[in-house]
Every structure is written in structure tokens, then in C-alpha cells.
Amino acid sequence: MIEKTTVTSGSLPTGELMADAQLIWDYHQMNHVLQPTDIGVGLGSHDLGVATFAAQLFHQGLFPTLVFTGANSPTTAARFPRGEAVHYRDHAIELGVPAKAILVEPLATNTGQNIAFTRDLLAARGEPVESVLLMSKPYMERRAFATCQKLWPDVQIVCASEPIEMAKYIDGIGDAGLVLDMLVGDLQRIIEYPALGFAVEQEVADEVYAAFERLIDAGHTSRLLN
């Protein structure tokens, strides 16, 4: 396991590090072709853009029912005090999604729970699900896919996120160091979670892994597992 160091990020990343970040950003994208599915699932996070994008895809007719899943994490408790899924639902309703088309799973505190609790919620309602459209932060697509394939292997998975360039996403977050930390943290989980039984394995190209190590050496470690 990669140990978390005491180095912290804060200064503006150099051009070389931003190039490494772009490699990892691109790796996290699954580039799935959007298609209609039985259900849409918006994975809770700090990023309200997930709910905005989910509402857009609902209006495009890609799924009849939308599930928002997520309680809170330390980074979302202040922003979404009633829970990520609840705030996502309210935002989607503001964007014209009918309340009756939205289900809320308010208990999940990690991606595995997002998937498992959503699966169980739909099973309890007797809703047959053969395909699911997972909507997440742009740098979380691959981990969402790997987690869902492990925990819900009998569904066809389509992954999607807001179509946005990394630089614009960083501008929206307002903290380049934090975004790079999150890119690194998600990649570490993709690498290590299969051995822990949390996800299926994903191939990581040598150049992506090298970029990952350089970003860690540069101090982008706040989202690494202990």
C-alpha cells in the first residue's frame, strides 16, 4: 500500500504536474456512449454538477427513474447539511425533474454503499433493473464502474459525467491542488480496492502510474488512504 506522507499541497501546480494530472483525468473517463437505461443513479459528492447533469439526462429521456444516493462526508456536511442525496433531489426538482421520478438513498457514506444500497432499494421496491446509468464527478467514472461491476454484476453499466475540461473544472472548484489530490486519491483506490474486494481490477497504463507517482512525490497526498 502507498503510504500517506506529511507533505501537503497548496502551491499552484507546475505545467509538468498539470500534464500529469491531465493524464490521470483522461484515464478516469470511461468514454461510454450514452444510451437509455432502466435507471439513472447520481452518486453523491461535493459536486452539485452531478445533479445538474443527471437532470439533463433525465430530460433527454435516458431513464425513467432517477436515484440520488449519499449521506455526508467531512467535505460535504457543511455544504449539504441535509445530506448529499436530499440536496441533489431538490436541485433536480428545481431543474424540472418531477419529484415522483426521483428516489433518495440517504445513508451511503462511500461508493460501495452508494451502489449496494441503491441496488437493495430498487430490489425492495420490486423494480427490475437490467441496465444502469451511473453519473458521477468526472474523475470518478472509472472507480464507479469498477465498484458497480463488483457489487452489481448482473446489470449493464453505462458511466457518464458532466462533459467538462479539466481546467474548467478546476476553475469551478477554485482549488487546483485539491482537485489534483482527488485525482490521485481516486486512482489509488482503483489500484488497491480490488485486492480488498471492493471493486474489479482495472488496467493502469505505465505512463498513468508514473504520473500518479510524480504527483504523490509533489505532495498531492491529502486524499490517499492511510
Image (cartoon, helix red, strand yellow):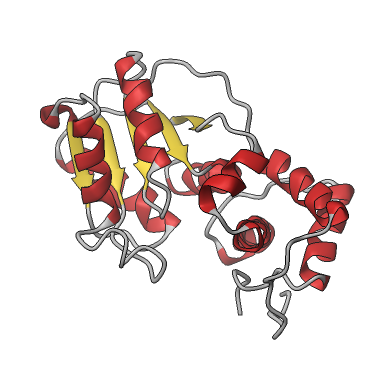
Q: Identify the residue shown where x is 48% and y is 31%.
A: 157
The residue lying toward the viewer, choosing from 14 and 157, is 14
Q: Name the residue at the left extreme.
A: 100
Is residue 45 something that shows in the picture?
yes
Q: Quadrant of the N terminus?
A: bottom right
Q: Position of residue 10 (x, y in %)?
A: 67, 71
Q: Position of residue 79 (x, y in %)?
A: 32, 60
Q: Identify the residue shown where x is 25% and y is 60%.
A: 107
Q: Quadrant of the C terminus?
A: bottom right
Q: Quarter of the image holding residue 134?
A: top left
Q: Quarter of the image holding residue 152?
A: top left
Q: Identify the residue shown where x is 28% and y is 44%.
A: 88
Q: Give the side of residue 206 with respect to residue 132, left or right.
A: right
Q: Position of residue 147 (x, y in %)?
A: 51, 49
Q: Identify the residue shown where x is 21% and y is 49%.
A: 86
The residue lying toward the viewer, choosing from 11 and 198, is 11
Q: Position of residue 170 (x, y in %)?
A: 60, 48
Q: Give the side of residue 9 with respect to residue 88, left or right.
A: right
Q: Give the side of residue 159 with respect to residue 108, left or right.
A: right
Is residue 154 something that shows in the picture?
no
| Relative vertical location of residue 80 with respect to residue 129 in this rendering, above or below | below
| Relative vertical location of residue 144 with respect to residue 178 in this rendering, above or below | above
Q: Name the residue at the bottom extreme.
A: 6
